[in-house]
Structures are given as C-alpha cells and as structure tokens.
Amino acid sequence: MKKLDEIMELMADEMKDFKTAVLELQKLSEQLVMMSIPISTEALEKNLSIFLHKQKAEKERTDEILKEIDRKLKHARIIPNYLLILFGILGILALGLVGYFGYSNNNKQQENFEVYRTIMESQNKSYEDYFAANPEIHQAYCEWIEAGYQDL
C-alpha cells in the first residue's frame, strides 16, 4: 500500500504542476488576445504601397540625375575652355610673329635689292663709259656673249 500511496502522491504532484502550467497558459492566451495582432493583410498592403511609392520617387530622382549626367557628358569637352583660349592666343601670337618676320624679311630683301641695283647701275655706268671710249672692245664683248649663248 505504501507503493500505492507514493504513486498517488506523485500523481498529485504531477496534477498540481499540470494545473499551474494550464493557468500560466491561460494568462499568456489572455495577453495574446489583448495584444490584438491584426491578421488581415491591410496593414501589410499599406506598408507595401508606401514602400513602392518611395521606391518610385527614388527611381524618378535617380532618372533625373542620370539624365543630367548624360546631358553634361554630351556637352563635355576633352580639352577645357582655358586651354582652348590659351592655344588661340598662342596661335594668334605665332601668326603675328610669322607675319612680322615675313614683312621685315621682305623689306630687308627690298633694301638689299635697292643697294644691289644702285651698285649695278654704278658698275653699268662705268662699263658704258669704258665701252663708249673703246668701241672695238665693246664689239668683241658682244660677240663673245652671243657665242656663249649659241653654245647652250
């Protein structure tokens, strides 16, 4: 009988533990009901629509930024403006220098030609005077020149 009492006592302890567990589960169940978590998809759909709207706005903003970058790239230059201005100024200076040196060289050549012409005229006058004084030498000189041209 002792064994039966021990079994009954164990059974009573188990029943008491089971009762406390059931009471605890009831409290948790009541708390769960009080929390009232909505099972409907309405809140989820609302959050999803807000998220999609934000994504759409972000995509539009990104598209605008990309269009602006594309527009800037179409108008972009490999060489910056200040380099173009610098090369333009250097080109104008080079062209001016070439013109100046060409003009001064032309003037120098004309001056040299005038000096040469005056020297030649003075020499020709002395030759003319000499040939006028010695017509036979002039005649021999003319024949000598004609003979030289005939050999060519």
Image (tube, rainbow, N blue to C red):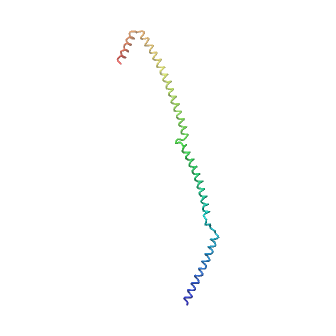
Q: Between 137 and 94, which is closer to the camera in this rendering?
A: 94
Taking the spot 57% from the left edge, 84% from the top edge, the residue there is 11
- In the rendered view, would you say 9 is above or below 133? below
Residue 108: x and y in percent read 49, 24
Quadrant housing the N terminus: bottom right
Quarter the C terminus occupies:
top left
How many numbered circles does the render carry?
0
Q: Position of residue 72 (x, y in %)?
A: 56, 45
Q: Residue furthest left?
A: 151
The residue lying toward the viewer, choosing from 68 and 150, is 68
**Please, is residue 91 above or below residue 12 in the view?**
above
x and y percentages locating residue 41 in the rendered image: 60, 64
Residue 17 placement: quadrant: bottom right
Q: Name the image quarter holding residue 38.
A: bottom right
> Relative to residue 3, is residue 135 depicted above or below?
above
Q: Residue furthest right?
A: 34
- Residue shown at the point (57%, 50%) measured from the top left: 63
Quarter holding residue 53: bottom right
